[in-house]
Image (cartoon, helix red, strand yellow):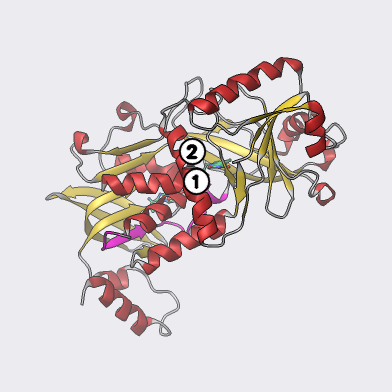
Amino acid sequence: MDWQEKFQVSMKQLSGLLTLITFSSIFNLMEKVTITIIGAGVIGLAIAAEVSKKRKDIILLEKNEKFGQETSSRNSEVIHAGIYYPENSLKAKFCVEGKMLLYDFLEKYSLPYKRCGKFIVAVEKNEIEKLYLIKEQASKNGVDDLKFIEKNELKKFIPNIRGKSALFSPSTGIFDTYKFMQTLETIAKNNKVLISYNSEVIGIEKVNGNYKIIVKEQDNTTFEFLSEIVVNCAGLYSEKIAQIVGINTKSAGYKIYYGKGEYFSLPGKYKNLFNSLIYPVIPLNSKSLGIHTVLDLQGMIRLGPNIFYVKEIDYSVDESHREEFYNAVKRYFPFIEEDELSPDMAGIRPKLQGPGDDFKDFVINEETDKGLPGFINLIGIDSPGLTSSLKIAKYVSNKI
Ligand SMILES: Cc1cc2nc3c(=O)[nH]c(=O)nc-3n(C[C@H](O)[C@H](O)[C@H](O)COP(=O)(O)OP(=O)(O)OC[C@H]3O[C@@H](n4cnc5c(N)ncnc54)[C@H](O)[C@@H]3O)c2cc1C
């Protein structure tokens, strides 16, 4: 019997006897695994599902009690087309390829999504020329389906909108990220990945060509095991994990800044006011895509996210920011009243791009050159991380 079979037998024996089984209680059956993935956000789950197609003895460790409790469930749920990123960047390539993989996956597993498209709307005349720059950048990235929409045509799509003209992106969409992650978790489990929740990685040491992983459980007990390969997908904490294994993250360029993004919602009376996403015109090197309208699959509308840097992880929404959101939305829809906006939720982007910095790409590095063979860091996986997740998983799988 291999350790996974022993694990399953052990789980069956224990089930019904215990309501809370700590992972360490059965873990002494196993001393070494091949691959340890840290973090069960969308990236860790996608990697677990992909890598387990070929490799066995994989463990996925997550400090929270469930998958996707952090950035992967605090975002706009948009399938991005890949329009704005510099050509040949990982963000551009992974977004464009990831988008196609994602649509195929959602179709294959009958998961909820809408290819709703998005309008980038020029409200003022001087914004129109910027639409050309955006279209040009999109083409460089292989996104050739953007269409110019003139004022009258725009009004046919969205009768109440104020706008001079727009770019329409037909390949932009929205999807149900919870069901997507749930499906990835199921695939990983079916491929015998051992997923351990309430398990926080607190130490990693290099030992005889392997990595000793030290894990703290919910009841504060710890256990340790060896792993040949480690994949760091810890999102906002990925810099911390890199530090734990001994990397000087400052000199490596792995410093993570927290780029907070808040959302405000519109009342139900505006449900289905329009059926596509509406984005402002932004300069190409912006830190975010600007406060836009976010649709959910039921047609409810949120506005967001804004962006500002914070020092602590805190998901509260500052009500005093309502005016910023109101100013953004009233450009397109002057009839919406400020007091109709309600604070909704917030997410935090793990950004390599600090205040005043230029564009920073995803970092996905196998760290042999830092004396850490088999250690793979994923740092700064901010937007378009959701869209790119399946492509990132294939890329990491090839590195393994
Ligand atoms: C406001 C906002 C809007 C966004 N909108 C979009 C969008 O519309 N489209 C798009 O493509 N992308 C979007 N993104 C980006 C996208 O959400 C992220 O790129 C993606 O969710 C990152 O996933 P992740 O798995 O890397 O991180 P996370 O979801 O944060 O997962 C990391 C996991 O690691 C776990 N972890 C951390 N430390 C440890 C430890 N020591 N031990 C064990 N586990 C640990 C955490 O608990 C967490 O579950 C948005 C992001 C934000 C913030």
Question: Looking at the image, do the residues carrying marks 2 and 1 touch, with CB atoms under 8 Å apart?
Answer: yes
Q: Name the foreground residue: 283 vs 119.
A: 119
Which stretch appears magenta? 54-73
- Is 60 part of what is drawn in magenta? yes
Residue at 29% x, 55% y: name it. Answer: 36
Residue type highlighted by circle 1: Met
Q: Position of residue 23 (x, y in %)?
A: 34, 68
Q: Quadrant of residue 20?
A: bottom left
Q: Quadrant of residue 322?
A: top right
Magenta residues, dominant SS class: loop
Q: CA distance from mark 2 to mark 1?
A: 7 Å
Q: Quadrant of the N terminus?
A: bottom left
- Is 281 part of what is drawn in magenta? no
Residue at 76% x, 31% y: name it. Answer: 323
Element class at badge 2 = helix
In the rendered view, does 386 fall on the left or right side of 307?
Answer: left
Q: Name the foreground residue: 228 vs 397.
A: 397
The residue singled out by tag 1 in the image is 100
The residue singled out by tag 2 in the image is 96
Q: Quadrant of residue 326?
A: top right
Q: Is residue 76 visible?
A: no
